[in-house]
Each structure stands twice: as structure tokens, then as C-alpha cells.
Amino acid sequence: MKKLFLFFCACIIFALAGCGGNYGDAQPDGNASAVPESTSTAPTEAVVYDSTAAKAESKTVELDGVTYRNNFYGRLIPHEPVYSQPPVLEKGRNRYFRIYGEGYEFLYGESVYCRDDQWQELYDYYANPANFEYLCLIDKNDGEGLVAYPAPDMDPEMLDALCDFQKSNSYNSIGNKNTRQLPFSVWHEPELRFVKKSGNGLFNDGAAMFYIWEGKLVLLNYVSGDDYTAVTDVPDELSRYFVALVNSLPDESE
């Protein structure tokens, strides 16, 4: 009997070898430890970005006379947030917990909120590609698990494009003209994940479940029994870029 392993890409991205966190409608489970402080701060020469649209689409919550606002971190995902207990605010079905960064205050609920008077500074920080560490994670199926390789020259716009491609194709393999069947053995090739981690360690983004097959980058959709692997071809420009990036990685990992 065929077993269909669906590609739950979003969950995999959250893991990203310790680079992930909880996000969305899920609430913290209450097993938080003491709240650590971040080890990094915003750059001394701040770059100002147009935040008009983001601020217009943001939401706010009030706590002890202080306004907190979300939507300052774009598409990023909270990186294993460690939060205080008990919740400091309950609003409808949402519970909010405190997260502390170095000099910043956050509330963690259905999304992450920061103090309104710190919102623009944090928005500018996370909008700046220079404030991230770029990595390629590789699982060579040799029992070592995911190994992280620094990729400081990774093009942030190309990574964003790859993330967009993944999100548009991960759950839409049926009827997708770019999806095809390959031998089951693709599943045993090295898995590739491309990640960026914020310098202050609070947020990350990335794309997972990619493989190189016959010199081209493909996105794994699912494996059907021992028969075949369904993949979606990555557009040529993105494929060439990331295959070349993988081939240029240093021999030593982090």
C-alpha cells in the first residue's frame, strides 16, 4: 500500500536545524524557562525604510498604559521565543507573554508585538539585509543530520524569491505544470535548506526541502511509497543561482 508523505514545509522551516520557532495561531505551551537577553544590538548607522504600508496593516494591543504594535518583522518567523510566565494579558482567545530583548520589550501572542515607540527602529533593523547571517544547511543522509555552512554572499533578494516560490508551490503540486515524477532515489540525495538568521537572534526565514537532480534545483512535494518522488522544478534563474551557491560553499561547516 502506498504511503503518501505530504510535504509540510512550513513546519520544517520553523525547525531549520534550531533556527525556527512558533508562529501563527498557536499559543505558547507554558513550558518557558527564564528569559535570556539578546547578545546583539541594532547597527550604529541605522538605515530608514518606508514603513507606511506595514504600519497601516499593523495591529495594536494595550498593556499597563503602553501600546504594542505588530507587523514590524515582515515575513520573518520568531526564532524559538522564550517567554515569561504567566501570560501578562488575555484578550479573547489570545494570550500574550513577555519576551525581552536587549533594550526592547515584546509581547508574544498570535504574533509578536513590540512597544510602539520602538516599532520604527525595529522595523528598520529587520528590513535591512545586512543585519542577517546567511546559511546553507545540508543533510547528506550520512547520519550526521543537518550541517550548517556559512553563505555570507547569498543574495537576499534571491532568497526571498526562493521562499516565495516554495510557499506558492508546496501545497499545489496537483495540476502544476512544473511538477513531475522522479525516481524514489531523489529522496536519498542531500537535502538543502537556505536560511537567514537575524543578528539579534530573534527572527529567521528560510526555504527547505530542496534537492539537486541532474544539475537542477527541485522542490520535493511528496514521496509515494517506494515508487516515485514528486518534485516541482525551480525556475531556471533561481536554480542556477542556488546550485552555484551550493557548489561554492567552503569545505568546513560552522
Image (cartoon, helix red, strand yellow):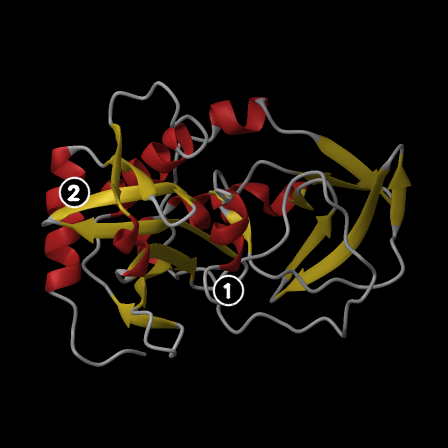
Q: Quadrant of residue 142?
A: bottom left
Nearer to us in this view, 91 or 245:
245
**Residues under labels 2 and 1: Cα distance?**
29 Å
In the image, taking residue 238 as reference, residue 122 lies left or right, namely right
Q: Residue furthest front?
A: 1
* Placement of 233 over or under 80, stated as above or below: above
Please state which of residues 41 and 133 is positioned toward the viewer in this rendering.
133
**Which badge, 2 or 1, comes first in the chain's sequence?**
1
Q: The residue under label 1 is which amino acid type? A: Gly
Percent coordinates x, y for residue 68 in the rendering: 72, 41
User: Is 12 in front, or is 141?
Assistant: 141
Q: Tell me, yes or no, whether the two marked residues, 2 and 1, touch with CB atoms within 8 Å.
A: no
Q: Position of residue 171 (x, y in %)?
A: 46, 30
- Along the horizontal axis of the image, is 113 left or right of 30? left
> Residue at position x 31%, y 55% from top?
130
Amino acid under disc 2: Ser
Would you name the residue on which mark 2 appears? 239
User: SS class of the residue under badge 1?
Assistant: loop
Pointer 1: what residue?
201
Q: Position of residue 236 (x, y in %)?
A: 12, 35
How packed mark 2 is, by other alpha carbons closer than 10 Å (few <14, some 14-19, many 20 or more), is some
